[in-house]
Amino acid sequence: MSKTTTVPAGGVRLKKQREPERFALIGVWIAVIIFFSFATDRFMTEGNISSLLGSQAVLLILALGLLLPLRVGDFDLSVASTLGLSAMLVAILNVEHGWNVWLAALFAILVGCVIGLVNGVVVVRWNINPFIVTLGMSTFIQGVIFWVSKSNTISGIDPVLSDFVLQETIFGVPADFWYALIVAAVIWYVFEFTPLGQRFLFVGQSQDMARLNGIAVSRTRVLALVASGGIAALAGVVLAGSTGSADPNSAASFLMPAFAACFLGTTVLKIGRFNPWGTVIALYFIGTGTTGLQLLGAQNYVQQLFYGAALIIAVILAEVLRKRNARRLQNVARQAALAAAKSGDGSTSNTKDNA
Amino acid sequence: MSTPSHVTTGAASGGPGTDVLRIAGLVKRFNGVPALGGVDLAVAPGEVHGLLGANGCGKSTLIKTLAGVHDADEGQVSVLGKEVAMPFGADGLRAHGLSFVHQDLGLADAATVVEHFALDGISSKGAVARIPWAQQRRRVADLLERFEVAIDPDARIDQLTPVNRAMVAIVRAVASQEQLREESGGERTAQLLILDEPTVFLPKADVDILFGLVDRLRQQGDSVLFVSHDLDEVLEFCDRVTVLRDGKLAGTRDVAGLQRSELVELILGVQIGDVQRPTDDHRARPEVALATSGLTGDMVKGVDLTIHPGEVVGVTGLAGSGIEEITDLIYGVRPAKHGTVSVAGEVVKHPTPSAMMSRHVVLLPADRKTLGSAPRLTVLENMSLPFLSQDFKGGRLNWKRMKSRAEEATKRLRVKPQDTSALFSSLSGGNQQKALLGKWLDTKPAVMLLAEPSQGVDVGARQEIFRLVREAVGEGASVLCATSDYEQLVQLADRVLIFADGRIRGELVGDQITKDALTTAIYAGVAA
């Protein structure tokens, strides 16, 4: 062990842990980027980078919304269908019913929140595993999408929307990427600096413990599902804007990569915790990998191989890192306690303990 | 061993047979500390043998050793006169014919009775062999009829009453031994059933029903080792009784003609006098910090208690007496079936943890790891939980203030390490408990509900916890401390309520609170 535990006068204090593992994925990401920029000259082009950043924005917003129920300890498998329904609603209301596109978007987001509310109420009212509830909801919504669209792709959405999400570029990157970052920043703020974020965290650790500490557990869980529904619908609006149309078959493919990004994100920056910036990094790591492989001529199925493998590896990695981390912190704490005991409450000693 | 044993082989066995189980000089140490310091025990064929002792006497260590959970360090164990080599292995003495029914019974709520019995048959056959359900159902129906147990074989476990569940577990344990015997071709094994406190949660009428079954087992020549803390059940149903004290044999007696007081003496190791009458001085104070009226839950039955400001009220009793539940009921962890809780004279309409917290009533739960804390989060996060709303100023949490509050508390309470960014799980049990206590003390509670506050806490931390509780009481807080740790009550409590069978059955005040008086009162409470 090369860690240094300093015991200054007046008490025991541990040196800030460095935890190099939490930056490991960033290192791997950089390595992957370097690899692809040498492997193919089409990778490091402005067009490719901008399209990579922009094309993942819908997925990123979806994954960020998914973080909320995951932080609370609940799964939401209905987010991808909610995204699909939202895009479809914008298209139908705008194209077929002549609604103002912004009004349609607002309505779609509201519908997303209602879906989350139904999920949440069913989960807490009858105490049913959200995994099952949202799985059922997901299939139900997919049915609704086919029903209202008569299984047709609906195009011709007011270009105002697509201008807003896609055509506007900032630093050469489509606006939707920046919107996604704003969502990430908001969620980060909520997680780190609000009581709500802490309540999410504690409910996710132990519902019983949270309840004993006065947290309204049911309300918190419902809220997280409402938020994930609403944010999924927002992602749907962005999708409708970026394609100008809504395809009834497009939604399902978003589910797996969103989960992969969230879980892989728990190995980055804050090990063992669902965190927005970790998710952003994980998602672009996955995106870089699939885009690069496709540029090298890989088939489309590579994407699925990549997403599936990433999810499984992510959960294994998260668990291994978490355990390792906990064990190391325990060791350090034990040493510090021993040192304190040895030096008579640590009041006079300033020994350096190099184990 | 310290006390000579009074083994009278054959008294109830219908002839001088070989003992079914004979244990001699069994020693089991944990980290060098003996939990069993040389135990002797002999169970004769066809007898119901009680095993008694106070908390921590070694009963459960002994049973766990026989069941293969622990390996003994020294001693001899023989079954039907043949010595069994140690260690026994993971299955314990099951292969020699012992069967175990523990307090939790080991049944799955959602499965039926037949499915449970079939399980024992399945495991020995191939995984894909067809289960002959009709035959299984017949076999189970026959078994239940043979033991005169009126239960529908197709009933799900969660549809059964507690006593019927216990009977299912017992018949199942006996039947699986019989099956083993048949399959092994009649090789002679013990027919010994070990019942590990199966009656703790049962009312008296159900205990009688259960012992009807035990009696039928005895009639067919089986032996039963009945582990209990209930003197009356032992005196009523057992042929002989062995008492353990401090990990050693205190004595074995024939139950016929045995006096209750003699049994209590064996358990305590001292002579006992009458239970002292409580005096009234503490209750004379008019103000009331917290009171319950007719509070009833699963175990607690119609409890009225009153806690005055600045008072430490202890609650103690045997397992199953309701002391496990009383703090949860008051705090509203589960809704009470009947009765009310009032704080400072005002009835709390629907007690929930958040309602109680807002009235400055806090709970330190017994299960520190799963209910008291979030071990995977940091000390700071755990300690800041009650202050989230208070420290949310100007749209953001004031982590700086939260951190300085937590650091001040860990320093004052001498929590080590003092780094509040450490994971909560990295603290030792004692430091965890101090941190949690510190968290609540910072909320300036009016009433602290403590459930087994020094469980799994080292001696030093234990004293500090007592000191902290005393300090808070000095500042006007009241404490209700539910514990089976008598020593703790002697040090901490102004008044102790003795629980038995869910009710308050006695009270000790001030100087009356001694370890012996508590033990005596508890066993007297059971008798009342």
Image (cartoon, coloured by chain):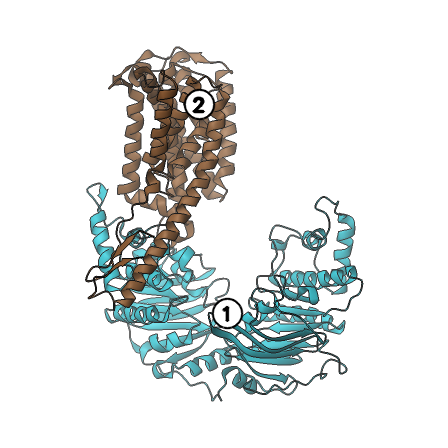
Question: Percent position (x, y) of residue A332?
Answer: 33, 55
Residue at (44% x, 19% y) in the render:
A294
Q: Residues within 10 Å of mark 2 (few under 14, many from 20)?
A: many
Is residue B320 rendered to the left or right of residue B357?
right
**Can you tell which mark lies on residue B349?**
none
Q: Which chain is brown?
A: A
Name the subunit of mark 1: B
Spot occupied by residue A329 in the image (x, y as percentages of width and height): 34, 53
Q: Which mark is residue B319?
A: 1
Quadrant location, the C terminus of chain A: bottom left
Does residue A55 appear in the picture of this structure? no
Residue B480: where, in percent of width, then height? 36, 68
Q: Colour of chain B?
A: cyan
Task: Inspect this view and state whether residue B262 appears.
Answer: yes
Q: Quadrant of residue A65?
A: top left
Q: Chain of mark 2?
A: A
Q: Secondary structure at mark 1?
A: loop
Q: Toward the viewer: B431 or A294? A: A294
Circle on res. A84: 2
Secondary structure of the residue carrying numbered label 2? helix
Residue type beneath disc 1: Ala
Please tell me which residue is depicted at 52% across the width and 37% down the height of the picture: A132
Looking at the image, which residue is at 74% across and 65% down? B147
Q: How many marks?
A: 2
- Residue A77 point in image, percent of width and height: 47, 33
